[in-house]
């Protein structure tokens, strides 16, 4: 019996320091432990929640992993820490943020981890890059594709392709 890797989608964001370099370094560190598949374009986006902070650069990447969801979360938090993220207030400026958006078609709801990401359906800065690489990916709870979720957002939240 062969065990297949799970297809996972991660959202990466940075709004401190050299934002592009932070994204590149995070992808490099992820690629040392996971097989990176598709990577979206980079988008320059307005902050959501705490709007009194610098703009973000965001991207979404597809990865293949044999890690369990909690192990993947530990890896993501370790990379955030290595790149200078300090755990503290939520919605504060940060050099890197790595969110697990989807882990296969699993639905996980624990105090430390919720998958699919609980707010992805209302966030253009996640849906725009995700729709670029996986428009037909279906949300296992809502039942809509990423493309349909994006069409449902009226406010595009200042999401621009970064050149």
Image: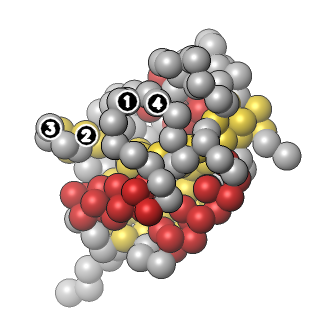
Q: Position of residue 88 (x, y in %)?
A: 33, 36
Do the CB atoms of the residues marked 3 and 4 lie less than 8 Å apart? no
The residue that label 3 is drawn on is 111
Q: Mark 2 or mark 3: which is in front? A: 3
Q: Gap between marks 4 and 2, in whole Å?
A: 20 Å
Assess whether mark 2 and mark 1 are in contact (beta carbons under 8 angstroms).
no
**SS of the residue under disc 3:** loop
Question: Residue visible at 64% across and 62% down?
Answer: 24
Relative vertical location of residue 74 with respect to residue 130 in this rendering, above or below: below
Place of residue 56 in the rendered image (x, y in percent of width and height, measured from the top left) = 63, 36
Residue 92: mark: 4
Q: Secondary structure at mark 1?
A: loop
Which mark's residue is nearer the viewer, 3 or 1?
A: 1
Separation of residues labelled 3 and 4 (CA atoms): 21 Å
Residue contact between numbered discs 1 and 4, judged by CB atoms under 8 Å: yes
Who is closer to the viewer here, 155 or 131?
155
Q: Give the mark, 1 or 2, whose residue is nearer the N terminus.
A: 1
- Where does the image place residue 98, in percent across and percent down from the top left? 45, 50
SS for callout 4:
loop
In the image, is 159 to the left or to the right of 5?
Answer: right
Q: What residue is pinned by disc 1?
A: 90
Tell me how far mark 1 sits from mark 4, CA to CA: 5 Å
Numbered mark located on residue 114 in the image:
2
Q: Quadrant of residue 2?
A: bottom left
For label 1, count other residues whose C-alpha is less than 10 Å away and answer few (under 14), some (14-19) or many (20+). Answer: few
Q: Is residue 129 left or right of residue 35?
A: right
């Amino acid at each position: 019996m062969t065990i297949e890797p799970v297809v996972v989608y991660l959202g990466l964001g940075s709004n401190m320091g050299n934002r592009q370099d932070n994204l590149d370094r995070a992808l490099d560190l992820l690629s040392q432990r996971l097989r990176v598949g598709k990577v979206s374009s980079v988008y320059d986006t307005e902050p959501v929640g705490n709007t009194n902070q610098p703009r973000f650069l965001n991207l979404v990447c597809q990865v293949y992993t044999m890690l369990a969801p909690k192990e993947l979360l530990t890896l993501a938090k370790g990379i955030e820490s290595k790149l200078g993220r300090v755990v503290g207030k939520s919605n504060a400026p940060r050099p890197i943020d790595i969110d697990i958006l989807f882990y296969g078609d699993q639905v996980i709801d624990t105090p430390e981890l919720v998958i699919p990401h609980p707010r992805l359906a209302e966030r253009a800065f996640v849906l725009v890059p995700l729709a670029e690489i996986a428009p037909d990916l279906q949300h296992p709870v809502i039942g809509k594709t990423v493309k349909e979720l994006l069409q449902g957002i009226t406010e595009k939240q200042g999401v621009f392709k970064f050149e």
